[in-house]
Image: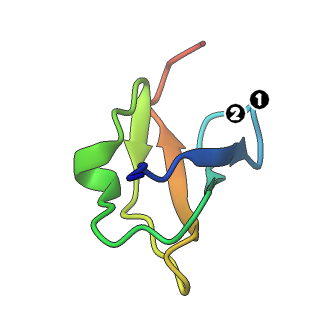
Amino acid sequence: MNHSPSVNTFTLSDTALKAGETATVTLVFSEAVASFSSATDITVANGTLAKMSSANNVNWTGTFTPTANTEE
């Protein structure tokens, strides 16, 4: 039976960012993913997410920068 990897956890190191701050985004998949691209596979609202990286293709991290003058 074929199955697709799923995201086990999605965390943001700070959920109450102030102007000029950033947060680390961490994704942990259920298994290694070979063709994950944060630029293509993730839609970001109210900010930008730097290209995510991984040493093992399971745990991925990137930096989220909120858009200036946004409250959400």
In the displayed structure image, the side of residue 40 where residue 30 appears, left or right: right
Circles 2 and 1 in contact, beta carbons < 8 Å: yes
Residue drawn at point x = 51 percent, y = 78 percent: 54
Q: Check the image and report above or below for 68 versus 38.
A: above
Residue drawn at point x = 50 percent, y = 45 percent: 65
Q: Amino acid at mark 2?
A: Lys
Q: Where is residue 62 shown, x and y percent of the image?
A: 52, 62
The C terminus sits in image quarter: top right
Residue drawn at point x = 43 percent, y = 24 percent: 46
Q: Where is residue 16 shown, x and y percent of the image?
A: 77, 29
**Front label number (2 vs 1):** 1
Q: Amino acid at mark 1?
A: Ala
In the displayed structure image, the side of residue 42 where residue 10 appears, left or right: right
User: Which residue is denoted by mark 1 in the rendering?
Assistant: 16
CA neighbours of label 1 inside 10 A, class few (<14), some (14 to 19), many (20+):
few
**Residue 21 can be seen in this image:** no
Tell me, what colour scheme is on the image?
rainbow
User: Which residue is denoted by mark 2 in the rendering?
Assistant: 18
Q: Where is residue 24 shown, x and y percent of the image?
A: 65, 56
Image label count: 2
Q: Residue furthest top?
A: 72
Q: Residue furthest front?
A: 1
Q: Where is residue 48 shown, x and y percent of the image?
A: 39, 43
